[in-house]
Image (cartoon, grey):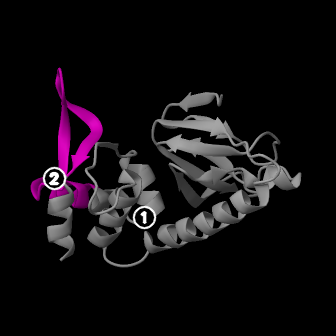
Amino acid sequence: MEKIISYKAGDLIYKSGQTGPAYKVITGTVRLDHAQASHKSVFANLAIAGDLVGAEVLLRKPYAFEAHALTDCEISVWQESTILLADALAEQLIKSSWRQSDVVSLRCGMAMERILKFVQLLSNKSATEKTENLSLPPLKETADITDLTIETVCRCIASLRKQGVLVPVQGTRGNLRNQFTVSVESMQAIAA
């Protein structure tokens, strides 16, 4: 039985240079940063549900990136039987290539397109699936990932709220911070 580990947004999962297990993301989003010699971290990639993080340890290497929970997330130690390991790793390599392509597209194009792609990536749903609650990371994180200013991200999110794409989740004392339900229909209308 796999043990699930929960992290709150902003929590450190592992540091580059350390060793440990590879993990599979069960829910939420993990941010991977490359630590530079200046001790400044630079955004490198994202991992969402189903993605593998820390795969380099399977080759007896230390973690290449620093991993933080971008949103509240759950991960489990990745374990595959020896017989299925090669196929499972090949599948994860393909997923990793697609994810890297997704992340590059978050940094190109018009601001609203970038934010829409980011919302779609975080919601991890196809255009036909019903989306549940979505936790958006803080504006500063979103701006860093999409290569936009905080002000631009704020304007785009406000616009998506007005257009009904992002509907704030109601709590007992008003809207829950950074919690939204995504309207797939409204998103499709904007994209058309």
Q: Name the disc covering residue 49, or none.
A: none
Q: Is residue 109 above or below residue 39?
A: below
Residue type (three-letter) at the residue carrying disc 2: Arg
Structural distance between the alpha carbons of marks 1 and 2: 19 Å
Residue 125, position in %: x, y?
35, 56
Q: Please report the residue visible at 20 percent of the width from the left and 36 percent of the height from the top.
A: 169
Residue 183, position in %: x, y?
19, 54
| Residue found at the very far front of the displayed protein | 83
Q: Please report the residue visible at 17 percent of the width from the left and 20 percent of the height from the top.
A: 172
| Residue found at the very far top of the displayed protein | 172
Q: Report the front residue among 18 and 79.
A: 79
* Disc 1: CA contacts within 10 A as few (<14), some (14-19) or many (>=20): many
Query: Which of the 4 image quadrants contains residue 177?
Result: top left
Magenta residue check for 163: yes
Provide the secondary structure element on which disc 1 rests.
helix
> In which quadrant is the N terminus drawn?
top right
Asked if residue 147 lies left or right of residue 134, the reply is: right
Asked if residue 62 lies left or right of residue 181, the reply is: right
Q: Please report the residue visible at 55 percent of the width from the left and 29 percent of the height from the top.
A: 6
Query: Which badge, 1 or 2, comes first in the chain's sequence?
Result: 1
In this orientation, does residue 69 appear? no
Q: Name the disc covering residue 146, or none.
A: 1
Q: Please report the residue visible at 59 percent of the width from the left and 30 percent of the height from the top.
A: 4
* Disc 2: CA contacts within 10 A as few (<14), some (14-19) or many (>=20): some
Q: Give the range drawn in magenta.
A: 154-182
> In which quadrant is the C terminus drawn?
bottom left
Residue under pointer 2: 161
Residue type (three-letter) at the residue carrying disc 1: Thr
Magenta residue check for 14: no
